[in-house]
Image: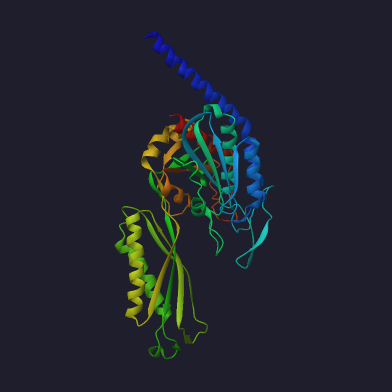
């Protein structure tokens, strides 16, 4: 009995010593992670054009002795680190692209990059924190490469381009990486990812089992009417009037048909185009918008009803309508068993009280495509200065984060990886 107690005491001692060693490594690495993030922030690149970013990532991984593949899904980088002992395969993902946003602040590493995007001159900015995600995963790679003896299995580092969407006419993002085999050779068992949030205090991690972020669809409705003089509407079929009725019908799906006590859902028409002159009833109208859903059955019902309404409302008023839908992202679905298994790892990093259950959001994330193939756990990382009352919203010129949050991201992904592989 005494021998058994001694074994447990020694095991606890060595585990505590190993954790202390890791803490020292995190402390030594923090300033470097911040510098990487600032460099990426100052030199942002749009989706499928992340050439400089990819080169810097690849150079760092190679310097660590990690096996590197480049040019995955155009500009993606994948690193493979094999531990000293055999085991399962964990994938860790960071998105690397920036947005066509002109930065508005006085940071010393403010982006001054300008470009033309879809015919419009614009700035380029990391307005969603992907620069932070990239720097965090580079830090995780360094920590794990220096601790290969503690790894039972393999770690696959996925630096993904085009999370914000590929340019028109191009493929990209998670879907293309999967198509090109990123989850194979070796086959991935689970995948972890995070997103820094400018509205969540530093030192806080937030999660939700099952549907965490929405499936995002882009829809188009093309309405065909009959052109006529504006003074004689009875001689034509007004596609603008029909479009208004269709938009009204879409909103009744949300307010009267979708069971919003189960999950949220949103239909937004973002653009409608028709006509050339004030006194001409045009021949056609086009509208585009987005559908956001968090439940697969609700998604199917809503999309089917949108198609039915478009066609039947147009027909009722003498016109015709065609409805098209494009799937941008799936539901960001956190495998509940994996979440329950790994929550203790997150609590090791920030403490029990700082790991919070969140509500689902109607934003989208193409990490969801990875989760359709393997169990995944995606969570939010605090990036707001505690006590701050100013909102630095994502996808805006004023977006900013507190860099004190970066090291918590490094710790969280490292802890998840080691714990999963060594359990």
The N terminus lies in quadrant: top left
**Considering depth in this image, is 65 or 228 the residue closer to the camera?**
65
Q: Quadrant of residue 120?
A: bottom right
- Number of marks present in the image shown: 0
**Considering depth in this image, is 124 or 320 the residue closer to the camera?**
320
Does the rendering let one see residue 254?
no
**Considering depth in this image, is 19 or 186 the residue closer to the camera?**
186
Q: Is residue 295 left or right of residue 216?
A: left
Residue 8, image x, y percentages: 42, 16
Does the rendering let one see residue 123?
yes
Q: Residue furthest top?
A: 2
Residue 259, image x, y percentages: 30, 57
271 shown above or below 16: below
Q: Quadrant of residue 135?
A: top right
330 shown above or below 144: below
Q: Is residue 267 left or right of residue 13?
A: left
């Amino acid at each position: 009995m005494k021998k058994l107690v001694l074994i447990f005491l020694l095991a606890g001692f060595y585990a505590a010593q190993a954790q202390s060693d890791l803490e020292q490594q995190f402390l030594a690495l923090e300033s470097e992670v911040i510098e990487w993030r600032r460099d990426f922030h100052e030199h942002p690149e749009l989706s499928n054009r992340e050439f400089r970013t990819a080169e810097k990532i690849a150079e760092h991984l190679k310097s660590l002795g990690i096996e590197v593949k480049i040019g995955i899904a155009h500009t993606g980088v994948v690193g493979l680190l094999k531990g000293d002992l055999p085991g399962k395969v964990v994938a860790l993902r960071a998105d690397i692209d920036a947005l066509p946003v002109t930065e508005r602040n006085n940071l010393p590493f403010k982006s001054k990059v300008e470009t033309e995007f879809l015919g419009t001159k614009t700035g380029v900015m990391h307005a969603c924190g992907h620069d932070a995600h990239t720097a965090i995963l580079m830090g995780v790679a360094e920590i794990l490469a220096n601790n290969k003896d503690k790894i039972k299995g393999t770690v696959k580092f996925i630096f993904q381009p085009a999370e914000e969407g590929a340019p028109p006419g191009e493929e990209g993002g998670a879907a293309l990486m999967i198509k090109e085999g990123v989850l194979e050779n070796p086959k991935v068992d689970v995948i972890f990812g995070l997103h820094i949030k400018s509205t969540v205090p530093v030192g806080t991690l937030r999660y939700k089992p099952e549907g965490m972020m929405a499936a995002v669809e882009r829809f188009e409705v093309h309405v065909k009417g009959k052109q006529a003089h504006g003074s004689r509407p009875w001689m034509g079929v007004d596609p603008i009037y029909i479009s208004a009725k269709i938009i009204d019908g879409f909103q009744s799906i949300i307010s009267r048909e979708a069971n919003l006590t189960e999950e949220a859902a949103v239909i937004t028409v973002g653009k409608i185009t028709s006509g050339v002159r004030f006194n001409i009833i045009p021949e056609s109208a086009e509208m585009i918008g987005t559908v956001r859903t968090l439940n697969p059955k609700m998604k199917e019902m809503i999309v089917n009803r949108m198609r039915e309404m478009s066609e039947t409302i147009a027909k009722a008023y003498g016109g015709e309508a065609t409805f098209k839908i494009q799937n941008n992202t799936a539901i960001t679905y956190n495998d509940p068993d994996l979440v329950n298994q790994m929550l203790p790892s997150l609590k090791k990093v920030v403490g029990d009280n700082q790991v919070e259950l969140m509500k689902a959001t109607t934003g989208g994330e193409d990490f969801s495509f990875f989760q359709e193939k393997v169990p995944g756990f995606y969570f939010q990382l605090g990036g707001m200065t505690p006590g701050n009352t100013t909102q630095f919203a994502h996808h805006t010129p004023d977006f900013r984060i507190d860099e004190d949050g970066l090291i918590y991201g490094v710790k969280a992904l490292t802890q998840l990886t080691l714990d999963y592989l060594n359990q």
